[in-house]
Amino acid sequence: MAQNFDMVVIGAGPGGYVAAIRGAQLGLKVACIEREHLGGICLNWGCIPTKAMLRSAEVFHLMHRAKDFGLSAQGIGFDLDKVVQRSRGVAKQLTGGIGHLFKKNKVTTIMGEARLTAPGKVSVKTDKGTEEVTARNIVLATGARARELPGLEPDGKLVWNYKHALVPPHMPKRLLVIGSGAIGIEFASFFNTMGADTTVVEVMDRVLPVEDAEISAFARKAFVKQGMTILEKATVKKLDRKGVTVTAHIETGGKTETQDFDTVISAVGIVGNVENLGLEDLGVKVDRTHVLTDEYCRTGVEGLYAIGDVAGAPWLAHKASHEGVMVAELIAGGHPHPVRPSSIAGCTYCHPQVASVGLTEAKAKELGHEVKVGRFPFMGNGKAIALGEPEGMIKTVFDARTGELLGAHMVGAEVTELIQGYVIGRQMETTEQELMETVFPHPTLSEMMHEAVLDAYGRAIHF
């Protein structure tokens, strides 16, 4: 006999488990189906364990700078296995917490592989056989996985994807990273800091191609200063794997050259997990591996929603989580506001950090805005200098006519924490006047956010 629920969530990543918990809080009878592990990619193989490893790299970097702070340190080194062990421990702690939250909120957990057999019906293959589940509302939160290009497929030995890079079988000596989006540049930053001779190949005309051009250029300069080799407008055409060496055929400017590496990380994007779910039979529309939805994550099939990475860009855990809350509240009879992708921040935890929200300067102009642009360097901020982090910049983009904050872009220490101030400003539809009248505490890095607004209107004090 089939189990019946008000809402069934397929996938227990950030969007899925948040949707399940919020639905239960609102009085719905909820089940969450997960085929691998609670927390999905983010907690197990993405956001959390990578940040744990990057923190180790940050401390390692600071240890080498001890003399800059009047300190001394000798025999500085690292144990890669212990770095990885710490990272995996952090991930395990958080995934265990999700199981606790499910029990606390009376969410039924079903471990298995789900397939939609009809509207409101799910068949789940478990270790004990097949279970049938029915629900008035079903939420797809199946996430995404690494894209694999022909000839660049990972093997876990010489060529890695993000999972391999999180449990590396060895410390690379000469590393090639294919792709300079958030995933690629974070791994490049980690292994470069730990001593690998790192080359990054980017097919677009600049690293971190979704960021504002000025921020990308600033970050590139910092990466090169740290010893990275950056190849832009370049393509890896082929990888020859021979013993313990990979020969990469890299095309730049119409010419192909070969370089030898001992390790390659492929970070060329993601594809949505839409296979074997029965979507075609239900008439669900899928475009380039992502489910098409409206602003409320409705698929067009009655009672069927899709959230998070499987529903398309931006591919961010915090976007997925808020979509999960929105959908749960909608199902429970509420009237939530739709998630606004243009007010969702992107954060990249390379060194230096990069963060942004809203439109780039170029995109704002392309859309017809007359803009006012403000900039403020970390060098002009007392807290940044005291921290020993004087390299960085904050940039703001305003509509010259209305004063609307169109976008904000940052590169430097702790900008992934600072960006939320501008996110709140975007969400509340603040203007330049309100931001200029806001008192920022001293001494803080956040003062630069104030100065970048002032600079857009010719009123910066410290620059």
Image (cartoon, rainbow, N blue to C red):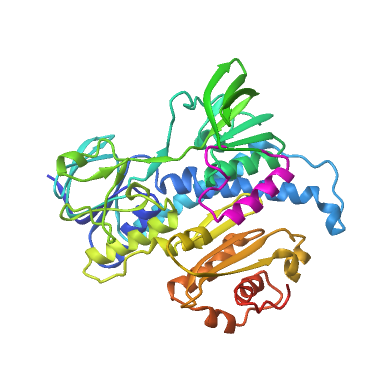
Place residue 244 in its image quadrant.
Answer: top right
Magenta region includes residue 227: yes
Foreground: 323 or 378? 378
Name the image quarter holding the N terminus. top left
**Residue at the spot 84% in from the left edge and 56% down from the top edge:** 68
- Toward the bottom, the furthest residue is 437
Would you say 272 lies left or right of 372 here? left
Quarter holding the C terminus is bottom right
Q: Nearer the viewer, residue 94 or 233?
A: 233
Look at 52% across and 37% down and name the residue there. 203
Task: Look at the picture and state if 219 lies above or below 124.
Answer: below
What percent of the width, then of the height, locates residue 309? 37, 48
Q: Position of residue 95 (x, y in %)?
A: 45, 49
Describe residue 306's horizontal placement relative to residue 48 as left or right: left
Position of residue 47 relative to residue 427, above or below, is above
Residue 167 visible in rendering: no
Judged left or right of residue 192, residue 293 is left
Magenta stretch in the rendered image: 202-229
The answer to whether one can see residue 126 in this image is yes
In the picture as drawn, the residue positioned furthest to the top comes out as 243
Q: Position of residue 374 (x, y in %)?
A: 61, 69
- The residue positioned 13% from the left and 48% from the top of the image is 119
Residue occupying image coordinates x 61% and y 56%: 214
378 relative position to 157: left or right: right
How many numbered tags mark residues here?
A: 0
Image x and y of residue 39, in percent: 42, 49
Does the magenta-highlighted stretch encompass residue 56? no
